[in-house]
Amino acid sequence: MAIEKMVLVSLSGNVEKIDIAALNCAKLKAFHPEKASDLKEYTKEYDFDYNDGSDDFAYEIKEIAKKYNISLGEQKQEEYIDEQQESERKKQLISNFLKSNPYVELYQCLLAISEMCGYTFKYEYSDSFDLNTADLEARVTSLYSEMSALFETKKEREKKKNELSHIVSQMSHLAGMDILLDELFGCQMFKVRFGYMPHESYLKLKYYQDKPFVCFSYDNDGRYDWCLYMVPRGVHKETDNIFKALYFERIIVPGYDKSEKFTADVVLQEAKEELSKVNAEIAELNAKIEALAKANIEFLQQAYCKVKFLKKCLELKQYASVVRDRFYLVGFVPQQKAFLLEQMLAGTQINMVIKDAADEERLQTPVKLKNGRWFKAFESLMGMYGLPNYGSFDPTKFFTVVYMLLFGIMFGDLGQGLVISLIGTLLYKFKKMSLGKVMAQVGLSSALFGFLYCSVFGNEEVLVPVHNKLFDSNGPLIAVGRSEMTLKILFAAVVIGVVLLITSIVINIITNIKQGNWVETFFGQKCIAGLVFYCSLVLLAVVKFTPDFNINVRLLVWLGIILPIILIFVKEFIAHSIREKKFAVEDGAVSYILLNAFELMEIVLSFISNTLSFLRIGGFILSHAGLMLTISIISRMFPNSSVIIAILGNALVIALEGLIVGVQVLRLEFYELFSRFFDGGGKQFEPFGVEV
């Protein structure tokens, strides 16, 4: 069994020690937390104060009095309500305490510093992390305040820079105009507007010739016209609305002193000079921020790692329960790690109780698969169906062997297999894709069977001399391209299916024996009764197609077909008899018989359809050979482009048929095999800690 053994760990101690417990559980990197409130023994009335039990007795008396309308004399209803409200208030205080995390604000400060200095912190775990953060907090807060002040000043100067850049951009269109702007803006009878508008809008001004305004363009870049318009003060609002509808954007000329005479060139020059000063100030602020960050970057990196770890640690408190002044923290730990946790908690005055996970039925034990490197790559594929339940059979090894075997058989080509393996290796090495590791392994299987098929990129002649020498054969060892091999290949596919189906049923039998499900073991359709029935069907098929095979058919039918069907039919009755319970048919005997009759028909059909489904193995062997033959013929038809055709053809086969074969093998495993022994209802083991 490749499922790691788990134990249920219960930690308890004074509520002030909860942070220490959370810290050590996170450092263990193997603590799967569970809600302590899901266990009845950790859900008594919340109370921080010491209580000798008399309050509990008084509370029970009050509840009984309330139920039977008994007056307690001195106790007033208002006082009883007040006590209930006080109890709820205490519960709320405890809830807030468990959710509190003093490191959240400090963590946000570090993230803000990271953003301000433009440096990304990288998390790295260290065994030296502890709960002492007083000096760290003071220094981080000081750095945050200092850097925030610089950053806010920089933001203000950047805002000013944007304003000045906009002025320079807009006023540059007025450069060279020998017009005193102070006289224009000082007109008593007219309003003057500078701005720009789309060229199409400027052309539409001819439709407003009857309106009392004058407009002319002083610059054009093909898309926009920079212009000014003058309008009498009494009607300027109507004119402003017209230009607004034509997408006119005003240029606000910077403030001026009416006592001075100035032109657009003067405004432009002053804006450029001020912009230059602002840029220098921003550069100086950037240098200060960079110097401050550089001088403290090592400290900030260490502080980030520690604070992020501690912040995550205290999130573990949300799983805890508090009864009186004690906390309770419950979780699953791999058995080999439990002793290590006990050592880590030594001297902390935190009690630790270890219980076998199999003895706790109220919580679903999480599953941690323990497989070697060769099989671990396929855990992600198998996880698409689900995880095994704790204590059951882990099918990873079976899944891996069958997947590689079937993929190699269905997509056998030495050259293409090595290409798939190379691509998978590169994907895993550089992209860390788990699928890449799978491709690397199935590619080797494809190459192995390609060697047996004597196929290298579809060429079945290259390896013939090697086969003749190694296997003493006259041609390929397995010539899948020959017409006389078609029936043999299809027959071999069915035989493979029969062997795999029998293997999956045997696995289910072993699993049920280990779990003590004896009724299912002997009478289940996926166990011994079903195995005998299926093997008998196979023997009958052999007798049908092999006249020389002698066997007592009548005895086989009675013992191998009829008897297993009867046992499967009466399984529920036998199960109730063993449990000493009366077997009752809800909808009547006739309905029960008909329902079971249809189920038996479904069992027979499923065995037949599951077996025939493996014909696709032979089908893909033949289709692969046919595709490569087609590519070979096309390349010979165009000798000048034969190399390009061969390369593109093989690439298409690898990409398209390789994907299809991968999906079909997955389908065979999930629907034909896993359905006979695997439920997939397990819960993933998720150790508490910081995700990197």
Image (tube, rainbow, N blue to C red):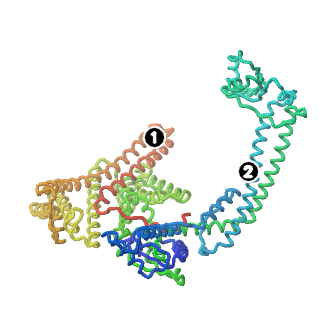
Quarter of the image where one finds residue 304? bottom right
Q: Are marks 2 and 1 in contact (CB under 8 Å)?
A: no
The image shows residue 111 at horizontal and vertical percentages of 64, 60
Q: Is residue 316 visible?
A: no
Q: Is residue 139 above or below residue 590?
A: below
Q: Quick check: can you spot residue 232?
A: yes
In the depicted view, which residue is nearer to us: 538 or 547?
538
What is the crowding at mark 1: few (fewer than 14 residues within 10 Å), some, or many (at least 20)? some
- Residue 503 is marked as none
Tag of residue 635? 1
Residue type, numbered disc 2: Lys
Which of the labelled discs sits on residue 155, or is there none? 2
Residue at image point 73% right, 22% down: 235
The secondary element bearing badge 2 is classed as: helix
Badge 1 amino acid: Ser
Q: How many marks?
A: 2
Q: Is residue 596 left or right of residue 687?
A: left
In the displayed structure image, the side of residue 178 where residue 341 appears, left or right: left
* Residue 33 horizontal side relative to residue 124, left or right: left
Q: Residue furthest top?
A: 210
